Structure formats: C-alpha cells, structure tokens
Image: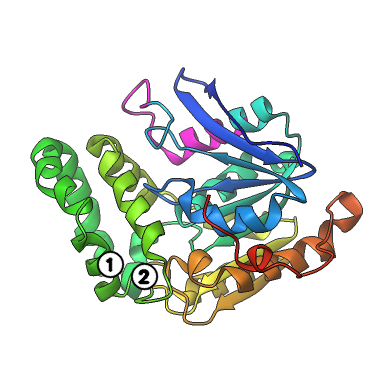
C-alpha cells in the first residue's frame, strides 16, 4: 500500500485546493458534505485504503483549502471545477465518486459535465437538489432558510462572535443529539467534536454563500441520464434528507441500487460503518472487479471491520 500524501493545486480561478491521497489501485474519490471536513470518512478509509487508492479533498474555504479568490465563486459549478482539478492533479483518469450530503450534488453535477471521468456513483445521505425543500420532511423550511442565509451573510461578523464559542463547547454535540439530527448514541462523540471544531473554523460569509448555492441547485433533470452503476445509501431516520428522497433518486437513475441504513440519521456513515462498508464492498465487487478492483479476502481483523480513527 502506498503511503499518505497531502498536497494542493490551484483551481480554475486561482483558489488553492488541498487534497489527500492514500493507498494504491482502483480509485475512490470522496466528496464531503457542506461545511464538513474529511473526518466523516474515517471508517471508510480504514476499510478500503489497503485495496484502493483514496482521494479526499477539502472544498474551497474548508479545511486546508484556501478561501475563494473571488467571493462570488462559491457555487456547485465551482466545486465541480475544483473536483476536476483535483482528479487531474492526482492523475486519476476515471473513478468511483462517493458523496455525502451536499457531496451528492457535487458528484451529480460533475457527472453532468464529465461523464467520461466517472466509473460509478455512490450518493450517501444526500439529495439531487433543492435540499431545503425536503429538510425535516417539509417544504416550508426553504422559505425560511434561504432568506435567513442571505441575511446571515450581511451580519456574518456578529453572528460569528455569538455562535462560534457555542460550536466549540460541549453543548453543541449534546444539542445535535437531542435534536435527532444525529443518532443519540451511535454517532461517535470524538467525530462530532472534530466536526464542530472544523465548523467553528470556517469563514462565515463563505459558509452562508455555499448554503445559498446548495439550496438553489438541482440535478434532478439529469438523473435519468446517469448510465453508470450507482449505489444510493440513505438513513432510515435522516431528518435532513428523508429516506423517500433517496428512494426517488434510486428509482430515477436507471442502474441504481439502494441501501437504507436501519436507524441511520444524516451521519449514518459513522453510526453503522460496517453495514455501509460491506454493502459498498459488494457493489464494487459486483461491478468493478474486472476493472481492477481488489475484493476483500477475509474479515479476520476487528480493525478492518470497524476501522480506527486516524
């Protein structure tokens, strides 16, 4: 297995995009959720990195990537172009794209423009578009949240002074558990702590602009044109992206398969990683073994089953 390597590359507008590669072989490219770091992929990385080449990257304004060179370049189109830049820099001609939350919109938008670079898609706990129309299973949230994000951008400085101390306090994970947005005991506390610390580090104006862009975007029109093998993964109790959204997406995509994670919320990928990783293993074995994917030979080690945070 090749070692881990982190580097950065200049995207189309000069924004520096940081990315990480590890392992060797069949490429899997991981696309984060909105305002997220690569931390949610910790168990998937432990499971697959000895048999695949993993590419992880930070969105513009996130993690180790730079702030957008131009404030208006915070769109799904910008992220699509950044992904192309990362693939070229990493020397990846064609890959499986795995997206969590907003990452689902990113990989669908990328497929729209560059289908020749996509071997397969794995959307995880996300929607094909207009996520705030189905947020908490109702459409009224879009009418509330979109104006709120626009106002939040205007008042970003006082907002940051009030909210950022809360995000780094023990109260933030506790409130997330009480709200039902994450599973009250299955979601690991250390992962949520890292997530909120990352959230507190973000530029608030960039975060509000990205939320607006995500809410306005839709790839619904091209779902029926997705002609690569696709595995849609949903959480049974995901309040942010209800399971029926995933069912609709899986029905619309001609070659799609569907996994519904029992008891899973929007962070199902770290709540029951063994189920998700094994289902992805079956998907990759069935569709890509003849294209160079190395299937799992045994399940003899506990760390292989669950993975250890790194």
Look at the image and say whether residue 81 sits in the magenta stretch: yes
> Does residue 219 show up?
no
Please state the horizontal and vertical placement of residue 231, each as a whole percent of the image.
Answer: 67, 65
Q: Does residue 303 appear to the left or right of 162 in the view shown? A: right
SS for callout 2? loop
In the picture of the structure, the residue carrying the numbered disc 2 is 182
The residue at the point 80 percent across, 63 percent down is 296
- Which segment did they paint magenta? 67-84
SS for callout 1? helix
Of all residues, the one furthest to the bottom in this rendering is 262
Does 90 appear above or below 164? above
Task: Please tell me how crowded label 1 is: few (under 14), some (14-19), or many (20+) other residues with Cα within 10 Å.
Answer: some
Q: Does residue 94 appear to the left or right of 200 in the view shown? A: right
Q: Nearer the viewer, residue 235 or 107?
A: 235
Q: Does residue 254 appear to the left or right of 71 in the view shown? A: right
Q: CA distance from mark 2 to mark 1?
A: 6 Å
- Earlier along the polypeptide chain: callout 2 or callout 1? 1
Tag shown at residue 176: 1
Q: Nearer the viewer, residue 60 or 13?
A: 60
Please state the horizontal and vertical placement of residue 158, each as a whole percent of the image.
Answer: 8, 40
């Amino acid at each position: 297995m090749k070692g881990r390597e982190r580097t950065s590359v200049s995207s189309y507008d000069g924004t520096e995009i940081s990315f990480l590669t590890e392992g060797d072989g069949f490429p899997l490219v991981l696309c984060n959720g909105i305002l997220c770091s690569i931390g949610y992929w910790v168990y998937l990385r432990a499971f697959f990195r000895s048999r695949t080449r993993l590419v992880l990257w930070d969105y513009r304004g996130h993690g180790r990537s730079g702030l957008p060179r131009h404030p208006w370049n915070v769109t799904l189109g910008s992220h699509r172009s950044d992904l192309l830049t990362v693939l070229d820099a990493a020397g990846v001609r064609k890959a499986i794209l795995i997206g969590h939350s907003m990452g689902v919109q990113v990989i669908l938008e990328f497929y729209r423009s560059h289908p020749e670079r996509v071997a397969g898609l794995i959307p995880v706990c996300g929607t094909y578009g207009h996520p705030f129309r189905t947020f908490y299973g109702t459409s009224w949230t879009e009418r509330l949240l979109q104006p709120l994000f626009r106002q939040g951008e205007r008042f970003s400085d006082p907002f940051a002074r009030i909210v950022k101390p809360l995000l780094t306090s023990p109260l933030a994970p506790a409130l997330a558990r009480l709200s039902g947005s994450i599973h009250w005991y299955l979601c690991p506390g250390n992962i949520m702590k890292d997530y909120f610390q990352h959230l507190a580090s973000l530029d608030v104006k960039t975060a509000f602009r990205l939320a607006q862009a995500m809410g306005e975007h839709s790839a619904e029109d091209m779902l029926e044109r997705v002609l690569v093998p696709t595995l849609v993964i949903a959480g049974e109790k995901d309040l942010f992206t209800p399971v029926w959204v995933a069912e609709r997406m899986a029905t619309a995509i001609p070659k799609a398969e569907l996994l519904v994670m029992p008891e899973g919320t929007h962070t199902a990928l770290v709540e029951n990683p063994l189920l998700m990783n094994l289902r992805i293993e079956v998907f990759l074995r069935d569709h890509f073994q003849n294209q160079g994917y190395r299937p799992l030979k045994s399940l003899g080690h506990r760390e292989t089953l669950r993975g250890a945070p790194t």
